[in-house]
Image (tube, rainbow, N blue to C red):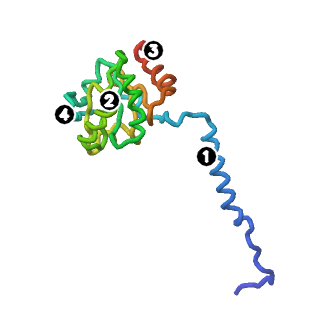
Amino acid sequence: MSVDTGSPRKPRRWLLFLPLVVFLGLAAVFMTQLLSGKNSAIVPSVLIGHKAPATKLPPLEGMGLPGIASADFKGRLTLLNVWASWCAPCREEQPLLMGLADDPRFRLVGLDYKDKPENARRFLGEMGNPFDAIGVDEKGTSTINWGVYGVPETFLIGRNGVILYKHVGPFTPQSIASDLMPAIQKAVSGS
């Protein structure tokens, strides 16, 4: 048997403010991240400091260049750029890669991601080919092993086959000068 106290149940007014409190909390987290000054192109990679993933990719036919194999990373500083002909930021980045191709301190190789060979050849014919080797990852399985989020992405691999640096997104003159070149210099000097 229940006892009626005669007083109506008080509405829980605080529940009305719960969505606002949640929104303000999320907004604070996003603003903190946005204003932190961190470079969004620098994405921490669990691969940095570890051996480059086992890679064996066939060459882009019709280019007269070799494909990519893990064994080729040893003994030379290598800059591996993941790109595709359908990637608009890759098109923006290509002139900068052409300039990097002249640097004798490292070998520049391209990993062509989920691309049609004829489109990749056309892209390189129009934009120039900065690569010493081009491996084709038609199905995207190798790029999964590299932890690629999207194209373009670039990895600096040391002479011992260990990944030293990763850049997400297209290079800019500023990112090359402030991030990539110091990483290359550090690798060259052995510090």
Tell me the mark number nearer the camera, choosing from 1 and 3: 1
Q: How many angstroms separate mark 1 from mark 3 (CA)?
A: 36 Å
Q: What element carries label 3?
A: loop
Relative side of 115 to 20, left or right: left
For marks 2 and 3, give the CA distance: 33 Å
Q: As drawn, is 142 to the left or to the right of 19?
A: left
Secondary element under disc 1, as helix, strand or loop, is helix
**Circle 2 residue:** 128
Labels 2, 3: front one: 2
> Secondary structure under badge 4?
loop
Marked residue nearer the N-terminal end (4 or 2): 4
**Residue at 32 percent of width and 26 percent of height:** 130
Res 62 label: 4
Going by the numbered disc 2, the residue's amino acid type is Gly
Quick one: quadrant of the C terminus? top left
Mark 3 sits on what residue?
191
Q: Quadrant of the N terminus?
A: bottom right
Which residue lies at the image location 40% right of the left edge and 35% below the top edge? Answer: 153
In primary-sequence order, the first of circles 3 and 4 is: 4
Reading the chain from its start, which is encountered first: label 2 or label 1?
1
In the picture of the structure, the residue carrying the numbered disc 1 is 30
Name the amino acid, label 1: Phe
Mark 2 and mark 3 lie on one chain; the one further toward the N terminus is 2
Q: Residue at x 65, y 56 (%)?
A: 22
